[in-house]
Amino acid sequence: MKMRTVISILLVLAIIFGLNGYIGWHAKVFLADQLGTWFHPGIYWIVFWLVALSYLLAWIGSRVLPGGVSRVLKVIGSYWFAMMQFGFLLLPLTDLAIGVLHLASVSSETYIPILGWLDTAIVLILMLRGSYNARTPVIRKYDITIPKQAGDWDQLRIAVASDIHLGSIVGNRHLRKLVTRVNEMKPDLILLPGDVIDDDIKPFIRYDMGTTMRQLQAPLGIYAVLGNHEYIGGHIPAFVEQMQKIGIHVLMDETVHLLDRLYIVGRKDKAAERTAEGRKALAALLEGADHAQPIIVLDHQPYHLDKAADAGADVMLSGHTHRGQMAPNHLITGRLFELDWGYLRKGNLHAIVSSGFGTWGPPIRLGSRSEIIELTVHFKK
């Protein structure tokens, strides 16, 4: 197992260094052509590798670097993730064009600046559009009916925000948009299906994001579950404590009977299956529940919709996928999950997967949007 882990790490590093070297060489050729004698290869490669490895440097040095330095490195590195994907998609096409132009006896002095500036313009347009998609949340509305009684309730309006990823990249500015848009809905209930923070709890505390998040309002309360990033960060007790301080209930394999009318089931993230304590099966969490009443399940990763349906869940709310966040990654998430975004009816189960409010890595979205879900649930009278 250790050897397999070492081989996997080495393979990932080889891919990272290989791809970055490929991008760096193309950028070097273009800059050398444009800057002429002003271009210094040694300085260029030092700056390039500092930028390319800045996220890794921030992660390795998080315990020794000042918070501000670590944050700057992480921001630079996050944007560089987008550059890596753009380079992976654009540069092979650029090389193909170079090959065709070379066979056509076109001088490199002609095609290098043209292709270089064309790639630069495409990347700039993608970055601007992607930034707009990530920073301008939309409201997705779903209207469903559960053929069960929930006391004297005719309907319930629920605000759902998954994958907020609060941390060094997504901070108070974006969080305030969430607070404003959710409170404008006047929801009865707020549900947060995982990845509230982005790995590390320290930026949440350092930038006092709890004060902003405390402004979320719903008469029936706010409930959250753990996502894989809470497990990656390893600060789960501190995260739960921070949420408790601002009135958010983190459900870890727990079932809440809300006003004796409706059940909210909060599952630990699937990542818990790799820990000593594991996580309970959904059927076990629903033992003793009155299945004549509505059951809403929060499960960060949208796996096993069939098992949720068989266990008697009426609604399952998830996130995690980001819908790939940047196209064409949605082609991958679409293969990995039965439902990677949107709505699916599975037997009596209404499954909804959000593309998320925040972002992981670059605050860039292409082919997806930052979103908040407004879910209206109608009950049998």
Image: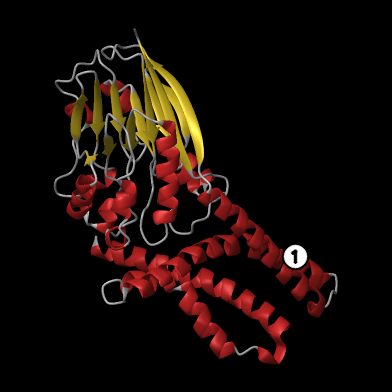
Q: Is residue 71 left or right of residue 136?
A: left
The residue located at (50%, 84%) in the rendering is 46
**Does residue 78 sit above or below 21 in this rendering?**
above
Quarter placement of the N terminus:
bottom left
Q: Residue furthest top?
A: 381
Give how far across and how far down residue 185 sits, in percent: 43, 32
Residue drawn at the location 52% of the way across and 55% of the way down: 364
The answer to whether residue 298 is above or below residue 274 is above
Q: How is the image coloured?
A: secondary structure
Which amino acid, mark 1? Ala
Q: Residues within 10 Å of mark 1 (few under 14, many from 20)?
A: some
Q: Could you say which quadrant of the image residue 352 lies in?
A: top left
In the image, is 179 to the left or to the right of 203? right
Q: For the C terminus, give its image quadrant.
A: top left
Residue 199 at x, y percent in the picture: 31, 57
Q: Residue 170 at x, y = what percent?
A: 41, 56
- The extreme right residue here reads 105
Q: Which residue is mark 1?
A: 97
Q: Which quadrant of the structure image shows residue 37?
A: bottom right
Assign a secondary structure to mark 1: helix
Which picture quadrant has residue 156? top left
Residue occupying the point 35% across, 36% down: 303
Q: Residue at x 56, y 55 (%)?
A: 131
Image side of residue 221 versus residue 184, left or right? left
Towards the viewer: 222 or 149:
222
Examine the rendering and report whether any part of residue 113 can be seen: yes
- Is residue 340 at all visible to an observer of this figure? no
Q: Which residue ends up furthest to the bottom in the rendered image? A: 37
Instruction: Judge by depth and name the residue closer to the eye, 314 or 207.
Output: 207
Q: Position of residue 22 (x, y in %)?
A: 57, 72
State whether residue 346 is above or below residue 202: above
